[in-house]
């Protein structure tokens, strides 16, 4: 039995392969039982979502690749404590969010320490595109990403999980650790903000 992109392939008696879906919880249990390929299947299934969420959270700050690696390392280290119940994606995204918030806090501290000094803050040069960055997005999605990046942090988190990751209100509430009603309010305000930005952009194009 082998795994490819989160799918289990079973060989039938006549030699034909048959794909069998495996849940995230099943893959976590299999990994805890010593199946390294199960972890690879989890990575293949979720790395794009992790990378894109981290990129949205961090904005212009380099580090999405590092967050991707740190998040899955944390998954591996905490696998035995994972309780399952079909909530792997929310659990994973909460890990990603916490890693991003730590980086943003460190960046703010760094800027405060450098403020008022004669030293210039020089951001490190790009290390070039990593594997996850090869995922191409069309022009409309890129424009939307830039607009979302201008939203307040909590609105940005909620709308990214809702619009890009197709998570439910309940799942988003789990990731952001807030009531479902608050999630709905954040998404409503994010949509209103994006609509206003779109209107401003349209009026600017006409002038």
Image (cartoon, grey):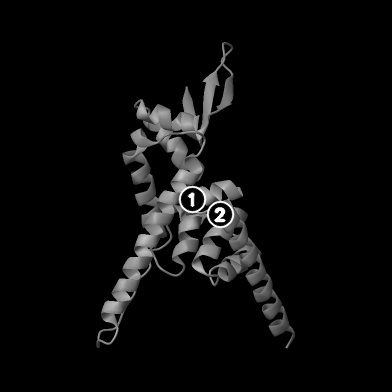
**Residue at the far right in the pictured view:** 206
Q: Residue at x 47, y 62 (%)?
A: 57
* Residue identified by numbered label 1: 175
Crowd class of label 2 (few under 14; some 14 to 19; many from 20; radius 10 Å) = many
Q: Is residue 200 left or right of residue 112?
A: right
Crowd class of label 1 (few under 14; some 14 to 19; many from 20; radius 10 Å) = many
Q: Secondary structure at mark 1?
A: helix
Q: Is residue 136 visible?
A: no
Query: Which quadrant of the view contains residue 206?
Result: bottom right
* Nearest the eye: 155 or 144: 155
Q: For the residues labelled 2 and 1, say whether their Cβ atoms are less than 8 Å apart.
A: yes
* Nearest the eye: 13 or 42: 42
* Image quarter in which the C terminus is found: bottom right
Q: Residue at x 38, y 30 (%)?
A: 31
Give the number of the disc on residue 85. none
Query: Which quadrant of the view contains residue 115?
Result: bottom left
Q: Is residue 67 left or right of residue 201?
A: left
Residue 20's place in the image compared with 176, above or below, is above
Q: Position of residue 92 (x, y in %)?
A: 44, 46
Q: Position of residue 1 (x, y in %)?
A: 47, 22
Residue 176's place in the image compared with 192, above or below, is above
Q: Is residue 195 visible?
A: yes
Give the number of the disc on residue 161. 2
**Residue at the far top in the pictured view:** 13
Q: Residue at x 57, y 25 (%)?
A: 20
Q: Position of residue 88 (x, y in %)?
A: 48, 40
Residue 17's place in the image compared with 50, above or below, is above
Q: Residue at x 55, y 58 (%)?
A: 158
Q: Nearer the viewer, mark 2 or mark 1?
A: 1
Q: Position of residue 165 (x, y in %)?
A: 57, 51
Tell me how far mark 2 sits from mark 1, CA to CA. Answer: 9 Å
Q: Secondary structure at mark 2?
A: helix
């Amino acid at each position: 039995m082998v795994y490819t992109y989160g799918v289990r392939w079973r060989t039938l008696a006549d030699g034909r392969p048959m794909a069998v879906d495996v849940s995230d919880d099943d893959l976590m249990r299999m990994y805890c039982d010593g199946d390294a390929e199960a972890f690879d299947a989890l990575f293949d299934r979720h790395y794009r979502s992790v990378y894109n969420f981290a990129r949205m959270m961090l904005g212009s700050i380099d580090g999405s690749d590092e967050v991707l690696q740190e998040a899955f390392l944390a998954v591996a280290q905490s696998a035995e404590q994972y309780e399952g119940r079909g909530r792997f994606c929310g659990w994973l995204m909460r890990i990603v969010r916490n890693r991003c918030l730590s980086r943003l806090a460190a960046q703010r501290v760094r800027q405060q320490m450098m403020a008022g000094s004669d030293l210039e803050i020089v951001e490190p040069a790009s290390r070039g595109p990593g594997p996850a960055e090869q995922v191409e997005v069309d022009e409309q999605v890129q424009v939307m990403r830039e607009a979302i990046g201008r939203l307040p942090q909590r609105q940005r988190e909620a709308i990214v999980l809702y619009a890009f990751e197709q998570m439910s209100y309940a799942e988003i509430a789990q990731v952001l650790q807030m009531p479902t009603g608050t999630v709905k309010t954040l998404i409503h305000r994010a949509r209103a903000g994006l609509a206003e930005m779109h209107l401003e952009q349209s009026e600017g194009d006409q002038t």
